[in-house]
Image (cartoon, rainbow, N blue to C red):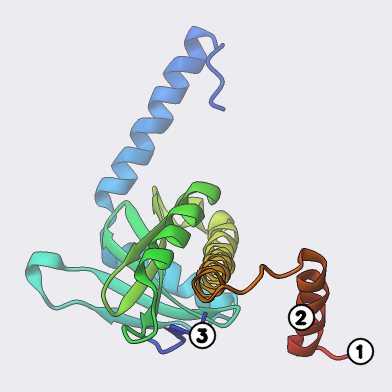
Amino acid sequence: MQCLSYKAIKVEWIMGLFGKKESKRQDAAIQDKTEEQTPEMLADALFAYLQKEGFFPERETSEDPSSRRVLLYFKFQGLNVTMEIPDNDYLRLVVVFEVDPESADYFNLMMAASQTMYEMRAVKVVLGVKWIQFSVETFVASADTFTPFLMRYLEILSDAVGGHRAAYSRYQEEKARELEKEKKASSGESPEDPMEKLLQDAVNAQLDNPVKS
């Protein structure tokens, strides 16, 4: 996507009476644990986990008292990921790219964002004037209950970025074809033979392929 830059910026309900009581006791224990947990404590545990798994994280704490939050930075499959921990039971995994206002097609960027959110579970895509943000958000009872799913969340985030890039490229190609048709129609040129176009597209695709046989 040329306009983007890599700059960093089934619960079971059939249960006996004892099972219900046990479930209530477990839920209460989790709630008590969450209430005792602070964003800093959650961040400490997740930071240690990321270190152990070889992510080489960095840490930052916002000094704004009205929006105190802990940020953990690390890389995953070439993406600069931010883990934002603004509360004791909630976090977001975020990837942000710069958008070049001079070359970006904002309508197609929004169309691609809508398609990505429709096709991908748990993903949000937000578009600004000079940036586009991909995020996955979740509630967290504790670091121990979250970390088994961390890789899955990161894969979803990576797939969302790739899916958006592919969708945006398709929309841009469709736009270019429509503009070409309008140009030929206005100049009185005969429409291009479909078979000839298919052959030309195949040749161009082979020429543009960076992986040479």
Label 2 crowd (10 A; few <14 / some 14-19 / many >=20): few
Mark toward the start of the polypeptide (2 vs 1): 2
Give residue 202's position: percent from left, percent from top: 81, 76
**Exactly how many numbered labels are in the figure?**
3
- The residue at the point 39 percent across, 23 percent down is 24
Q: Are marks 3 and 2 in contact (CB under 8 Å)?
A: no
Element type where label 1 sits in the image: loop
Crowd rating for badge 1 (residues with CA inside 10 Å; few <14, some 14–19, many 20+): few
10 Å crowding of disc 3: few (<14), some (14-19), many (20+): few
Residue toward you, 61 or 84? 84
Residue drawn at the location 50% of the way across and 56% of the way down? 116
Which quadrant of the structure image shows residue 193? bottom right
CB contact under 8 Å: marks 1 and 3? no
**Secondary element at image label 3:** loop
Q: Position of residue 207 (x, y in %)?
A: 78, 89
Question: Which callout, 3 or 2, points at the residue further toward the start of the chain?
Answer: 3
Q: Please give the residue where the numbered disc 2 appears in the rendered image.
A: 205
Q: Residue at x 39, y 47 (%)?
A: 141
Residue farthest to the left, as pictured: 66
Mark drawn on residue 159: none
Residue at x 58% of width, y 55% of height: 148
120, above or below 205, in the image = above
Residue 172: % across, % down: 52, 71
Element under disc 2: helix
Amino acid at the residue labelled 2 = Ala
The residue labelled by disc 1 is 213
Q: Closer to the camera: disc 1 or disc 3?
A: 1
Residue 56 badge: 3
In which image quadrant can residue 38 be found? bottom left
